[in-house]
Image (cartoon, rainbow, N blue to C red):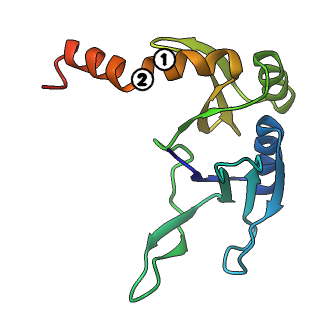
Amino acid sequence: MIHHLSITAHNPQHVAQILAELLQGEAFPFPAANFPDSYVAVPLDSYGTTIDVHPFNTELVPGSGENGFQLKPNPDASIYTATHAAISVPTSEEQICEIAAREGWRSVKRSGFFDVIEVWLENRVLIELLPPTFADQYLAFMEPQALKRFLAAKGTVK
């Protein structure tokens, strides 16, 4: 289970507020002084789900000694990233599309192994949202035995 995700944004506070709206939670400034201009979006659920939103160009790099990591600016960072997440949200499909449209962010319903709504935060970071009507499809597809059968049929599991 993924409990925590970190992303970057040009406007971290705004993106955290929109994520909080999609999660039907709240956004707060990051609670550590060494993360300036960073915010967290939290649905305040029983899983401890948290999405950190750091300023664009921020990279987490390995620390030394007892420091697990440190923040480092990268002036040459690409505006795109391979990092993305699928997140179940209590928000309806219609609400998700309305919020994305209001923000001017690309959103599209995508059907494949299961349905998701792709939302491109700031038109650069992908999140795949699973409203309640989609989450059951995802969970059925990812059920361990069903997933193993699917992967074995594709030749990826022996």
Residue 143's disc is 2
Count of labels in the image: 2
Q: Residues within 10 Å of mark 1 (few under 14, many from 20)?
A: few
* Badge 2 amino acid: Glu
Name the residue located 69 percent from the left edge and 25 percent from the top edge: 106
Q: Position of residue 138 (x, y in %)?
A: 52, 21
Residue 123: quadrant of the picture: top right
Dot 2: what SS? loop
Tell which of 84 and 144 is nearer to you. 144
The structure residue drawn at horizontal position 45% and vertical position 13%, both measured from the top left corner, is: 113
Above or below residue 84? Residue 130 is above
Res 149 → quadrant: top left
Vertical arrangement, residue 122 with respect to residue 49, above or below:
above
Residue in the picture at 79% in, 20% down = 92
> Which x, y percent locates residue 148?
28, 22
Asked if residue 57 shows in the view, the reply is: yes
Q: Position of residue 105 (x, y in %)?
A: 74, 30
Could you tell me if residue 116 is visible in this image? no
Q: Is residue 156 above or below residue 57?
A: above
Residue at x-position 53% and y-position 43%? 80
Q: Which mark is residue 100?
A: none
- Determine whether, in the image, residue 122 is placed left or right of residue 82: right
Quadrant occupied by the C terminus: top left
Furthest-left residue in this view: 158
Does residue 59 appear to the left or right of 90 in the view shown?
Answer: left
Residue type at mark 1 is: Ala
Instruction: Please indicate whether residue 23 sits to the left or right of residue 63 in the image.
Output: right
For mark 1, what is the residue? 140
Mark 1 and mark 2 in contact? Answer it, CB < 8 Å.
Answer: yes
Label 1 to label 2: alpha-carbon separation: 5 Å
Q: Quadrant of residue 141?
A: top left
Question: Helix or strand or loop: what does disc 1 sit on?
Answer: helix
